[in-house]
Image (cartoon, grey):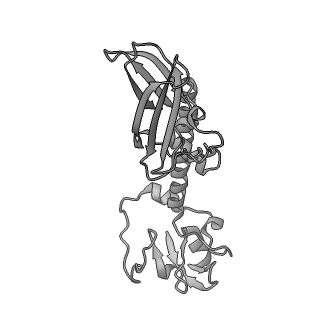
Amino acid sequence: MYTRCTACHTVHPVNAGLLARSGGQFRCGKCKKISNALDSLFDEWPGAGEKPPSAGEIPVLGLPIDLDEARESRLEPEEAGLYGDAETDSGPPGRRGKNWARLSWISISLVIVAAVTFKLLEFYEKPLAELPAAASLMTRLGIHNPPAAQPFRDLEQIHLVSRELTSHPLQADMLRLTATIVNRALQSQPYPDLELILLDAEGQPISNFRFSPADYLSEGASRGSGMTSQAFLPLILDLPDPGQVAVGFELNFL
């Protein structure tokens, strides 16, 4: 059973023992006003604006009784909070107990799921931080450092403007490739590695050479700044001459 203070409208749980002991009188633990609980008595937690049964109505006895609900309403005086100084909670005790039980089960379930997931990852030898969702959560919690930002890189935006493969002007057993490349991207990007493939008359590769930026950039050039957008870069590369079988070549960016 519940009664409502006529002054501050605070709802208090009551039982028959308390009402009989005080003749229906109670002091509100919130506003300290003394009221008659029988003037505002409810079987269920009253909603906003709900009125109690009118005085003078004759009760009908012998109706079915919900024993579970009656058991929940039998509270000790300390639990009723009629004379305490502390403010009462906003919900009925039965509902608060159910909410705590639900939260406990949810917490236990989450712990079990986390433990099973960790064991599965340990079994398959896959670190937890490699999962995108787990890595994101660990980063937000401060457990895992965010990955370093990768520099912009788009090899498809690096174009070969001109190229020519000729005999070396000073060494008979060497070839010289002169070419010009340009970065068509709207921002700078790292210098690429170059792959030069010499081809025979049937287009089959016969030699393969790889050059890093240190091989084709001039001394003193800053490699850290990368290829500036829309800037042309001339190249001069020297390589061994495989003989008359080399009649063509391919230049790839890596």
* Residue at (49% x, 17% y) in the render: 241
Asked if residue 56 lies left or right of residue 9, the reply is: left
Residue 187 shows in this picture: yes
Asked if residue 73 lies left or right of residue 162, the reply is: right
Q: Residue furthest left?
A: 202
Asked if residue 233 lies left or right of residue 201, the reply is: right
* Residue at (32% x, 15% y) in the render: 201
Q: Position of residue 204 (x, y in %)?
A: 35, 15
Q: Position of residue 137 (x, y in %)?
A: 56, 47
Q: Position of residue 135 (x, y in %)?
A: 56, 42
* Residue at (60% x, 71% y) in the render: 88
In terms of image quadrants, where is residue 182? Answer: top left
Relative to residue 50, is residue 229 depicted above or below?
A: above
Relative to residue 12, is residue 167 depicted above or below?
A: above
Say which of 112 and 246 sits in front.
Answer: 246
Say which of 58 and 109 sits in front.
Answer: 109
* Residue at (54% x, 35% y) in the render: 130
In terms of image quadrants, where is residue 56? Answer: bottom left
Q: Position of residue 11 (x, y in %)?
A: 52, 75
